[in-house]
């Protein structure tokens, strides 16, 4: 039996003459938390909507649990919990009525009464009407609805949006619990510290194309060095015009560089120019991600 939960091949969507996504080849394995990263308009939501059979692709294929997303969408959605980036809720219903309705519609496919435990963890007053909720409490409703049936696959679009830091932490704990249970999470977020905290792998989508897929620890460990060099006298401009080296900033006697290759050559040049000290900077996922979206991001594709 295949270990792939989500699989797309040459997935392409056009909106009229405008391209949404192009030739996206994606693979998400059972039991992993997969981070899907990209700025607004990059194609994250379009990809999710094809997976959920909201609309069909222009070309290519998408499957979940080995089943075609378009031909077997109804059957697939029974095993999926979804939190959209833009929630549409029944404003006049009380939260507990909404969850009971949702539980009823799921039938036997779920975990009866689990929503009560989730609501308590998120400190959500389910006796109030949804129309009376703040944005944060409406987001809690969406989180509970996505998790409450213990689905085999969770598709979460900006799950902590509008939540205070303590509740954000609880939601991330819930994501880890899903993984520990052997289930799968497709996690889209612009909060890169969250992605770094919970995801096993990440896919970076840029202008509709998937430009990188990598384990989080490998992406962070890749050799992007950021360093500030202190000199006795500031070297002339352009001295570090070397492939894989970008000069980020100049001070009175300092130069800050980002180095992706040719580090020995950088150090040799620095030594020849009376270097006095070097300060290195640890890069997190945010800096790595931004490298894919910099003007020179094509070098990383």
Image: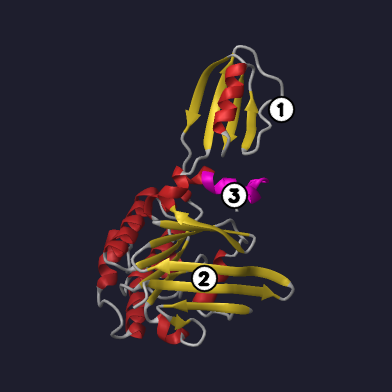
Relative height, residue 293 to residue 231 (above, below): below
Q: Is residue 207 above or below residue 151?
A: above
Which residue does the numbered mark 3 point to in the structure image? Answer: 300
Q: Rounded to the nearest whole Å, what is the CA distance between mark 2 and mark 1?
A: 45 Å
> Was residue 297 drawn as part of the magenta stretch in this picture?
yes
Which residue is found at the position 51% from the left and 77% from the top? 62
Marks 1 and 3, how far apart in space?
A: 22 Å
Q: Dot 1: few (<14), some (14–19), or many (≥20) neighbours within 10 Å? A: few
Please tell me which residue is depicted at 30% across the width and 72% down the height of the picture: 150
Q: Position of residue 118 (x, y in %)?
A: 29, 65
Res 122 seen here = no
Q: Quadrant of residue 143?
A: bottom left
Label 3 Cα neighbours within 10 Å, binned few <14 / some 14-19 / many ≥20: few
- Near mark 2 (Cα within 10 A), the count class, few <14, some 14-19 or many ≥20, is many
> What residue sits 44% from the left and 43% below the top?
221
Q: Earlier in the sequence, mark 2 or mark 1?
A: 2
Q: Is residue 291 visible?
A: yes
Write down the region rendered in magenta. 288-299
Query: Do the numbered discs 2 and 3 sit on residues whose CB atoms are within 8 Å?
Result: no
Marks 2 and 3, how far apart at CA: 25 Å
Label 3 residue SS: helix
Q: Kindly identify which numbered label has been placed on residue 238.
A: 1
Picture coordinates of residue 276, whole percent (x, y): 54, 14
Q: What label sits on residue 48 in the rendered view?
A: 2
Q: Nearer the viewer, residue 62 or 300?
A: 300
């Amino acid at each position: 039996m295949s270990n792939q939960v989500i699989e797309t091949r040459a997935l392409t969507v056009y909106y009229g003459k405008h391209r949404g996504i192009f030739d996206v080849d994606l693979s998400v394995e059972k039991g992993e938390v997969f981070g899907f990263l990209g700025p607004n308009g990059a194609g994250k939501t379009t990809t999710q909507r094809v997976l959920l059979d909201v609309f069909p692709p222009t070309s290519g294929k998408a499957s979940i649990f080995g089943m075609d997303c378009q031909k077997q969408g109804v059957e697939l959605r029974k095993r999926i919990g979804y939190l959209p980036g833009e929630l549409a809720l029944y404003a006049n219903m009380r939260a507990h009525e909404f969850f009971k309705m949702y539980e009823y519609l799921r039938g036997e496919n779920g975990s009866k009464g689990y929503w009560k435990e989730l609501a308590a963890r998120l400190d959500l007053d389910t006796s109030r009407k949804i129309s009376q909720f703040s944005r944060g409490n409406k987001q809690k409703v969406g989180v509970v609805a996505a998790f409450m049936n213990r689905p085999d696959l969770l598709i979460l679009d900006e799950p902590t949006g509008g939540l205070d830091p303590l509740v954000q932490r609880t939601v991330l704990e819930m994501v880890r619990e899903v993984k520990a249970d052997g289930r799968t999470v497709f996690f889209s977020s612009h909060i890169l510290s969250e992605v770094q905290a919970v995801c096993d792998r990440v896919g970076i989508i840029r202008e509709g194309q998937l430009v990188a897929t990598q384990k989080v620890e490998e992406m962070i460990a890749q050799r992007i060095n950021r360093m500030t060099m202190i000199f006795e006298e500031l070297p002339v401009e352009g001295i570090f015009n070397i492939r894989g080296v970008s000069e980020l900033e100049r001070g009175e006697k300092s130069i800050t560089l980002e180095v992706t290759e040719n580090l020995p050559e950088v150090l040799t040049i620095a030594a020849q120019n009376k270097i006095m000290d070097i300060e290195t900077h640890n890069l997190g996922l945010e800096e790595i991600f931004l490298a894919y979206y910099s003007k020179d991001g094509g070098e990383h594709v």
